[in-house]
Image (tube, grey):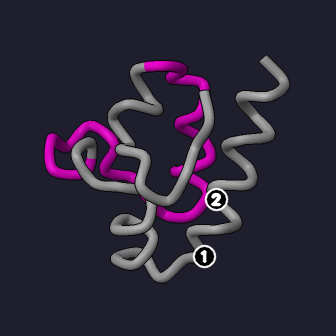
Amino acid sequence: MQITKDTIIGDILDADFDAAPYFLEIGMHCLGCPASRSETIEQACAVHGTNADELVAKLNAHFAAK
């Protein structure tokens, strides 16, 4: 799976729930909320004041290692 800032969080978690800690470590503790699952990485990072590019890089490294 290739992650971009436009990738939907729910799609990432559906593909591999082991990616959840990457969201939790930046303060996204609302992963079970339907609204958060439909957000893009970029939208969620804007709300949580974090760098979307850094999260995308970590997630792509995670999926590359699978």
Residue 55 is labelled as: 2
Residue type beneath disc 1: Asn
Q: Is residue 2 left or right of residue 57?
A: left
The mark tally for this picture is 2
Label 2 SS: helix
Expressed as whole percent of the image width and height from the top left, the position of residue 54 reads 70, 66
Residue 21 is labelled as: none
Residue farthest to the right, as pictured: 65
Q: Is residue 27 left or right of residue 57?
A: left
Mark 2–mark 1 contact, CB under 8 Å? yes
Label 1 SS: loop
x 53%, y 50%: residue: 23
Indicate the quadrant containing the N terminus: top left, top right, bottom left or bottom right.
Answer: top right
Magenta segment, which residues?
15-36
> 39 above or below 31?
below
Q: Examine the image and state in which quarter residue 11 appears.
A: top left
> 55 above or below 23?
below
x 27%, y 42%: residue: 37
Residue type beneath disc 2: Leu
- Give the Cα distance between marks 2 and 1: 7 Å
Expressed as whole percent of the image width and height from the top left, the position of residue 21 reads 60, 41
Indicate the quadrant containing the C terminus: top left, top right, bottom left or bottom right.
Answer: top right
Residue hosting label 1: 51
